[in-house]
Image: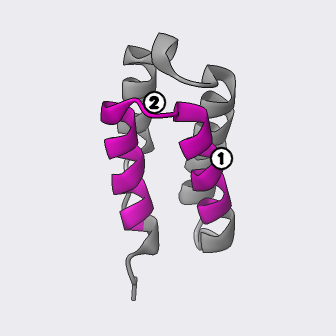
Amino acid sequence: MIQANPAELAAVLDEHETELSNPALARRTTARISEELAGFEPDRRRLTENLVDLNLAVGSVASVVTVVQALATAVAAPHG
């Protein structure tokens, strides 16, 4: 199981919503990521695609980008 914290991402999106490039897309994508992570065997390809979309949606808001990068690192890490 991938250890990541979509709740932290949702909180930082709330905090910086007016600064995001596309807040609606960021929310939808975060929901898809959360749903995928909740599954028994998350699909890394789908997660990666959603993370790309999320990066576009958040733009260059540094604090949000940091959380997205941490989530991407968790997705990319090998799990046994």
Q: What span is in magenta?
A: 47-74
Q: Amino acid at mark 2?
A: Ala
* Residue 65: % across, % down: 39, 41
Near-viewer residue (2 or 76): 76
> Residue sitting at 68 percent across and 33 percent down?
28
Residue 24 higher or lower than 54, as above or below: above
Distance CA(mark 1)–CA(mark 2):
15 Å
> Residue sitting at 33 percent across and 34 percent down?
62
| Residue under pointer 2 | 10
Q: Amino acid at mark 1?
A: Asp
Near-viewer residue (33 or 21): 21
User: Total number of numbered labels?
Assistant: 2
* Residue 24: % across, % down: 68, 23
Tell me the SS state at disc 1: helix
Residue 35 higher or lower than 45, as above or below: above
Q: Residue furthest bottom?
A: 80
Q: Residue furthest front?
A: 60
Residue 5 higher or lower than 64, as above or below: below
Q: Is residue 37 visible?
A: yes
Marks 1 and 2, the one that precedes in the sequence: 2
Residue 8 got which mark? none
The image quadrant of residue 14 is: top left
> Residue sitting at 60 percent across and 64 percent down?
48
Residue 53 got which mark? 1
Tell me the SS state at disc 2: helix
What kind of secondary structure does the magenta stretch mostly adopt?
helix
